[in-house]
Amino acid sequence: MDTGRVPRFYSTTSGVNSDAIYTKDEYLEMVKDFESSFPSPIVDDFDGRIIVREDLLEVGSKARAGEALISSVDNDTIVYVQPRFGFAGISLTKLCKMYSKKLVLFMPASKEVSEHQAYCIEHGCDAHFYRVAAMPNLNRIAKAYAKDTNSFFIPLGLRHKLVTAMIIKTACEIEEPKRFWTAFSTGVLNRALQIAWPNSEAYGLAVARNIKDGEKGRATIIGHYQYFEQNSKIIPPYASALNYDAKVWEYLQEGDLFWNVAGNIKSSINKTNINSNVKWKK
């Protein structure tokens, strides 16, 4: 498991799972009558490494996880912050079409939009670009917009009890592993799996940011040695987001389970036609 490389990100020492405000049974009760539109996850074995192939959904695992939430929202509009990289916004484009919702995505300004942002725009979101010093600032702007427009705001990572409940429900379809891994950013998936599989050893690979108190739960967090924008030097034998999930492959040992959230995705629009390079607002 030791790659001999220096990690860039470090976790806090807190072992609190901030999503464990409900028990596993209580989470399952929340979604017991909800039937997902998505097929059960495919689980493949790659040389003894067990991979949950959520890349086969195309739009990512958060589409499966977020469906119960979006189906329950009365508001006409969903508001979310879409960073340059991340499949939550991509998943929301699918869900909002399924449930006839308007999707407004707040995106950090840049010279050119990323593939993930371009995909969201191509598939119907209303993009609002802001130049900000940090993502929490954009989150506050988006939240205020949602309040002013009577829209439904979803925090980063689709953090919501119904999303956690659907991850737990899905995980219960899979045999509990001895040890599981996820890539780790907001940690929503990892914390939910900790609840679903209480006897498993939990591991997370921090690929984007430092982990705050309450986010890691009982997981052992390892910081990856590459910058988030850099693609993995080692390519796994399945489709995986190269700057995110793909980086976990080199850490997996025989018998480990890895939840592969998504593959690679491409937009077909001309990104230079999107004016994302906005100036600072006063």
Image (tube, helix red, strand yellow):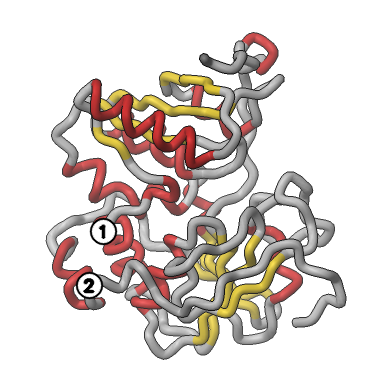
Res. 257 visible in picture: no
| Residue depicted at x 54% and y 84% | 179
Q: Residue at x 33, y 34 (%)?
A: 143
The image position of residue 109, as x and y in percent, is 60, 23
Q: Position of residue 52 (x, y in %)?
A: 52, 67
For residue 220, the mark is: none
Mark 2 Cα-neighbour bin, 10 Å: few <14, some 14–19, many ≥20: few
Q: Residue at x 59, y 17 (%)?
A: 280
Position of 94 with respect to 180 (left or right) is left
Q: Which mark is residue 22?
A: 2
Using the numbered discs, state the Cα–Cα distance from disc 2 to disc 1 in whole angstroms: 9 Å
Residue 204, horizontal then vertical, whole percent: 58, 71
| Amino acid beneath label 2 | Tyr
Relative to 79, residue 279 above or below: above
Disc 1 residue crowd, few under 14, some 14–19, many 20+, Cα 10 Å: some
Between residue 137 and residue 68, name the one nearer to us: 137
Indicate left or right for 51 with 42 as reference: right
Mark 2 and mark 1 residues within 8 Å of each other at the beta carbon = yes
